[in-house]
């Protein structure tokens, strides 16, 4: 059948339509999401950069002021002639009390040996080499204060030295060192507002990293580094890579879920559209079918009319002939045969007319229990011994308003069809009940009664079922039926203001339902 | 036959089918009625104008021409109220509605006896037209 192929066509075009609608949305959404991702990453970078810059500026100021302070110490008169240790100690004691960030002050020789520590006893003693002599050399070379590397101090705490050369008569004679705890710098760094996972650290000249804020464990990160002017230090901000990839993942999830939702929506809409088109096609097919039946009805009506005209002289002639040959028995028998044949032809035409809906009906209210009772024997007889008949009227079933003879004929036709569908025998159920909502759907409003003839026979496939209502259609062998049974029932039901419904599946039996207007209560 | 009071009642047969017409003539004449035949409603009207003796109109419904049998029956019964009318048709549904009061309907194919019975029934009372 073409129906299946057409449905596939519809499905394919709907799928294409959906994709056509979906693609630009996905592209747009992806573009938007990607640009949002870039903006987000850029702002992350900028934030890191600003933090970095800010911390570097603060640190730079602090270190510069420390360097200035140490340089001021080098101006002390204690260094003017012979080294006045007592005087220096006095100054240094006052200064270290006043400046708590200074752990101690030292005088160091130009080759890096300690002369005096204030307060005393913080290191192992005089004459020792300083822990980090590189910065001593640099301060002498540069003739200006320098900041040393961060090293592990006397109590294992990170510390660093700020050293300034004592220059007299244009020659460096000593170096003054202030040793500061690295912790003193901590307060300068913006630690509280550091986002989760970020690290901030100071990298000294030697490349030692001292962590100031953030988790102690380092992970794969993007590194932002800014050197502090006049020192060899740098401030470094580390932003974990996962923050960037998390953004990308979020974006990806947004795109994927967006596309999925759009796809679902399109599929839903497509399904609705498909249903709509399918129902349109079905009603179209039903209309075509109705037109075909209508045309066939007109055709058979015309044929029936002509046949009736042709039969008139035959039947009338036989009637007159009968009167003339009353004495001739043989001739009378011929006439009788011809008459019987003509009578059968007349009945056939009457059934044709019933299909073409030009049969005259005399409607009356039919009491169903009585009607069934009257028909019972006739139906059982036509079913034969192989089939059982079960008559059933549900309570609350309204009586019907129809032509009694035609209804009888229609039911007879349906029962005979049921019998023929069950060559092995079986049960035929004739059931009367109030018509269901679906059954009444094609009819004008009002009360209806449904009469069902149910068999458990061979059943029909869809094509056979559709053709079954056309006149002369018969599955029976030639000579075994006129093929007018169902079309008669169909014509009768429609002419009575009802409808004939057929439901069947191969192997599952057939149910023929005549829906008729109910008698007024 | 034809010796009763009905002998004067002429039956006008309106039928376009010659074979059917011939059959009807035989049956009706056999029943003792004088017969006139025409093939259309228009011709029937002309005969009715001319022949005052026509007491029964026996007409087919489906015919060629401007008027069909039902229209003819309506028109004729309006102008000659005492005219008895029998309509016949190959469409049984033509027997429904649109038939003047008092007119009979006979579905084709009809039996000779049925036609005779109808004629005698209609002709029994005084069937003279004014």
Image: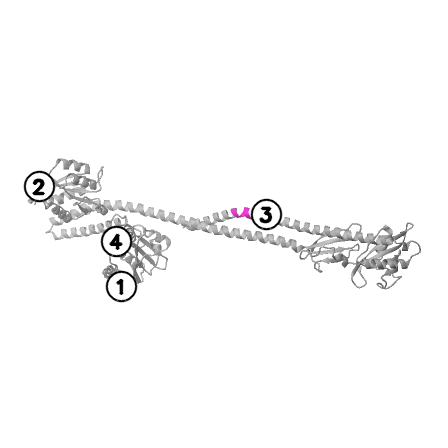
**Marks 4 and 2: same chain?**
no
The residue that disc 1 covers is: A385
**Do the residues under discs 1 and 4 have CB atoms within 8 angstroms?**
no
Rounded to the nearest angstrom, the CA distance separating label 3 from label 2 is: 106 Å
Q: Is residue B2 left or right of residue A198?
A: left
Tell us which disc is closer to us: 3 or 4.
3
* Badge nearest the viewer, 1 or 3: 3
Task: Give the residues in magenta.
Answer: A21-26
Q: Secondary structure at mark 1?
A: loop
Along the line of sight, which residue is nearer the eye, A455 or A76?
A: A76
Instruction: Report whether mark 3 lies on the same chain as mark 4.
Output: yes
Proximity of marks 3 and 2: CB atoms separated by less than 8 Å: no
The label shown at residue A402 is 4
Q: Which of the 4 image quadrants contains residue A154?
A: bottom right
Foreground tag (2 vs 1): 2
Q: Which mark is residue A32?
A: 3
Chain assignment, label 2: B
**Quadrant of the snapshot with the C terminus of chain B:** top left
Residue A25 among those drawn in magenta: yes
Cα gap from disc 4 to disc 2, whole angstroms = 44 Å
Q: Chain of mark 1?
A: A
* Mark closer to the chain start, 1 or 3: 3
Chain letter for the residue marked with disc 3 in the picture: A
Q: Separation of disc 2 and disc 1 at Cα?
A: 61 Å
- Image side of residue A499 versus residue B67, left or right: right
Query: What SS does tag 2 mark?
Result: helix
* Residue named by callout 2: B8
Q: Position of residue A73 (x, y in %)?
A: 86, 54
Q: Distance of mark 1 from mark 3, alpha carbons?
A: 80 Å
Question: How far is mark 1 from mark 4, CA to CA?
Answer: 30 Å
Callout 1: 10 Å neighbours few (<14), some, many (20+)? few
Q: Residue furthest right?
A: A82
């Amino acid at each position: 059948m073409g129906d299946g192929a057409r449905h596939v066509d519809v499905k394919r075009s709907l799928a294409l339509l959906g994709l056509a609608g979906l693609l630009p949305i996905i592209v747009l959404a992806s573009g938007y999401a990607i640009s949002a991702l870039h903006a987000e990453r850029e702002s992350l970078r900028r934030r890191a950069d600003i933090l970095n810059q800010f911390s570097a500026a603060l640190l730079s100021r602090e270190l510069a002021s420390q360097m200035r302070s140490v340089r001021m110490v080098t101006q002390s008169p204690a260094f003017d002639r012979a080294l006045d240790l007592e005087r220096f100690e006095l100054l240094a004691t006052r200064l270290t009390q006043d400046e708590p960030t200074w752990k101690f002050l030292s005088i160091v020789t130009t080759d890096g040996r300690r002369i005096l520590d204030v307060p005393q006893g913080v290191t192992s003693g005089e004459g020792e080499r300083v822990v980090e002599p590189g910065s001593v050399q640099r301060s002498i070379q540069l003739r200006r204060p320098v900041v040393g590397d961060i090293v592990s101090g006397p109590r294992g705490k990170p510390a660093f030295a700020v050293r300034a050369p004592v220059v007299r008569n244009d020659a460096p004679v000593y170096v003054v060192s202030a040793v500061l705890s690295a912790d003193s710098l901590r307060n300068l760094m913006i630690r509280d507002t550091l986002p989760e996972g970020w690290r901030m650290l100071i990298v000294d000249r030697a490349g030692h990293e001292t962590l100031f804020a953030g988790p102690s464990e380092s992970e794969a990160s993007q590194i932002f580094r800014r050197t502090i002017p006049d020192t060899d230090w740098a401030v470094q901000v580390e932003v974990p890579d996962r923050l960037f990839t998390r953004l990308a993942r979020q974006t990806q999830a947004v795109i994927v879920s967006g596309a999925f939702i759009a796809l679902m929506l399109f599929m839903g809409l497509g399904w609705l559209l498909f249903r709509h088109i399918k129902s349109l096609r079905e009603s179209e097919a039903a209309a075509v079918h109705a037109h075909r039946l209508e045309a066939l009805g007109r055709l058979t009506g015309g044929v029936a009319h002509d046949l009736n005209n042709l039969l008139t002289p035959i039947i009338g002639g036989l009637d007159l002939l009968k009167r003339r040959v009353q004495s001739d028995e043989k001739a009378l028998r011929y006439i009788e045969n011809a008459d019987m044949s003509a009578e059968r032809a007349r009945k056939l035409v009457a059934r044709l007319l019933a299909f073409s809906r030009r049969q005259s009906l005399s409607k009356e209210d039919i009491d169903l229990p009585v009607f069934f009772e009257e028909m019972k024997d006739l139906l059982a007889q036509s079913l034969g011994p192989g089939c059982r008949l079960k008559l059933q009227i549900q309570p609350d079933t309204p009586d019907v308003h129809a032509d009694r003879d035609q209804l009888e004929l229609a039911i007879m036709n349906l029962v005979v069809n049921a019998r023929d569908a069950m060559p092995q025998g079986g049960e035929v159920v004739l059931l009367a009940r109030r018509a269901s909502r679906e059954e009444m759907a094609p009819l004008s409003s009002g009360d209806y009664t449904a009469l069902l003839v149910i068999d458990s026979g061979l059943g029909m496939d869809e094509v056979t079922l559709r053709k079954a209502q056309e006149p002369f259609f018969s599955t029976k062998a030639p000579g075994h039926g006129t093929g007018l049974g169902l079309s008669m029932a169909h014509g009768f039901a429609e002419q009575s203001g009802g409808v004939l419904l057929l439901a069947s599946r191969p192997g599952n039996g057939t149910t023929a339902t005549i829906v008729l207007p109910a008698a007024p209560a | 036959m034809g010796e009763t009071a009905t002998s004067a009642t002429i039956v006008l047969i309106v039928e376009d089918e010659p074979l059917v017409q011939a059959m009807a003539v035989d049956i009706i004449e056999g029943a003792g009625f004088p017969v006139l035949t025409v093939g259309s409603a228009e011709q029937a009207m002309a005969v009715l104008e001319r022949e005052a003796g026509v007491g029964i109109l026996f007409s087919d419904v489906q015919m060629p021409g401007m008027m069909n049998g039902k229209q003819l029956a309506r028109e004729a019964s309006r102008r000659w109220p005492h005219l008895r009318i029998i309509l016949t048709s190959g469409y049984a549904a033509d027997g429904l509605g649109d038939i003047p009061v008092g007119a009979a309907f006979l579905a084709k194919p009809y039996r000779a006896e049925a036609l005779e019975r109808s004629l005698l029934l209609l002709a029994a009372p005084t069937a003279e037209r004014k």
